[in-house]
Amino acid sequence: MKIGILSSGGDCPGINATIRGVGKTALMYYGMDVIGIHSGFIGLLNKDVQTFDERSLSGILNLGGTILGTSREKPFRKRLSSLGAEEPHLIKQNYDELGLDCLVCIGGNGTQKTAAMLSQLGLNVVGVPKTIDNDVFGTEITFGFDTAVNIATEAIDRLHSTANSHKRVMVVEVMGHHAGWIALYTGMAGGADVILLPELGYDMNKVNATILDRAHRGKPYSIVVVAEGIETPEKGHPSYYITRMIEEATGIECRDTVLGYIQRGGNPSPFDRNLATRLGGHATELIAKERFGRMVCVKNGTIDSIPLSEVGSKLKLITADNDLIIQGSRMGISFGY
Ligand code: F6P
C-alpha cells in the first residue's frame, strides 16, 4: 500500500509525533510506502510531496509545529483552483496520479469535515484529530491540549507573584474561540479566582462582585482567566474589555496578558507525544485493515475510532456539569454566572 500524510489547519505540538507514528508503523511494521504532503490540502492540489523513509522520520518526536507545513486551505469552498478544475476533483485526480491507497488527514474540526467529504468522493481517508483547543467532536482529548495547558499554567503561576506584590487583578487571555477547555483547565490548575468560558456566558456584575468580595476578605490580588472566544460588546481581545470593566467597577488596578501563539508553539509534552504516537499507530492499523472513512479517537481512555461522517460540523463543548466547574464553584471560584 502507499499512503499520504498531511497536516491541515492551525499547527499544534504533537503533529510531528503523529507523522512519525503513522510513518514508522507503516514503513516498518506494515511494509507500506509513505509520502508526506506539504502545506495541507494545498500540497494535494499542487502535488507538492516528499517521500518518507525511516531516516527522514527520525529526530522529530519532540519537535513542535509540523515538518510538513500546514494551511487553512478548504478544498470544498465553492471556487475554482488556478488549474481550472474544481479543487475536490483535482485532489481526487492527484490522489490517483500519486498512486495513493489512503490519505491520513491530521487536523481539527475543519480538516475532519474536509476528510469526510473526500471520503464521500471515493478517496480512502483516515483522520487523526489534533488541536490545542481540545474541541474536536468524538474524542475525549486531542494532543496539543496538554502542552498548551502546561504552558498557560506556567504563565499563570508566574503572574501570581507580581499580582501579589502590586495588589492587582491580572486578567489572562488564553486560546479557545468556541470552546473554553484551555481556560477551564489552565484556570483551575493555575488557581484562578474567576474563569470565563465562551460556552457558559458571564455577568460582569458577578465577576466584579467576586473581585470585590475577595478584596474585602483581605485577599490582596485576583487572577481572572478568560477564553479568547467569550462575547464582549467590543471588537478586539476580550481581556482588554474585561480588564477595563473590572478596574472601572472595583477601583482596583488591573493588568491584562494575552498569551496568544506561545500556547501553540514549541515542544509537545510527554503526554502529547505518547498520545500522538498511539493515535498515529492506530491510524495506520485502520489503514492496514482497510477501515477507511474513520477518525481515530480516545474513548473511555483507550484508542478507538468513529466514522468521519459523525465528526464533521460538530464541536465538543464544555457544559455546566463539568466536574472541574462543579468542584471549582464549591470552592468559591467564579465562572461568571
Ligand atoms: O489552533 C486553534 C487556535 O489556536 C484557536 O484557539 C485560535 O483562535 C486559532 O487557532 C488561531 O489560529 P490562526 O491565527 O492560525 O488562524
Image (spheres, rainbow, N blue to C red):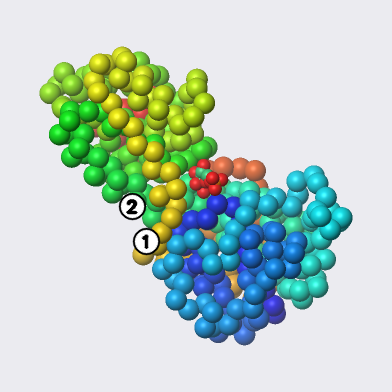
Task: Name above or below for residue 113 compared with residue 40.
Answer: above
Whole-percent x, y for residue 225 in the image: 35, 35
Whole-percent x, y for residue 173 in the image: 39, 36
Q: Viewer-proximal residue, 255 or 155?
A: 255
* Dot 1 crowding, Cα within 10 Å, few <14, some 14–19, many 20+: many
The answer to whether one can see residue 140 in this image is no
Quadrant of the image occupied by residue 101: bottom right
User: Which residue is labeled 1 in the image?
Assistant: 269
Task: Name above or below for residue 327 compared with residue 269.
Answer: above
Residue at 30% x, 40% y: name it. Answer: 188
Amino acid type, residue under disc 1 in the picture: Ser
Asked if the residues shown at circle 2 and circle 1 are in contact, with their CB atoms under 8 angstroms apart, the answer is: yes
Whole-percent x, y for residue 159 in the image: 25, 40
User: Could you tell me how far apart the alpha carbons at marks 2 and 1 are, in whole angstroms?
Assistant: 8 Å
Q: Viewer-proximal residue, 18 or 30?
A: 18
Whole-percent x, y for residue 147 in the image: 39, 55
User: Which residue is labeled 2 in the image?
Assistant: 150
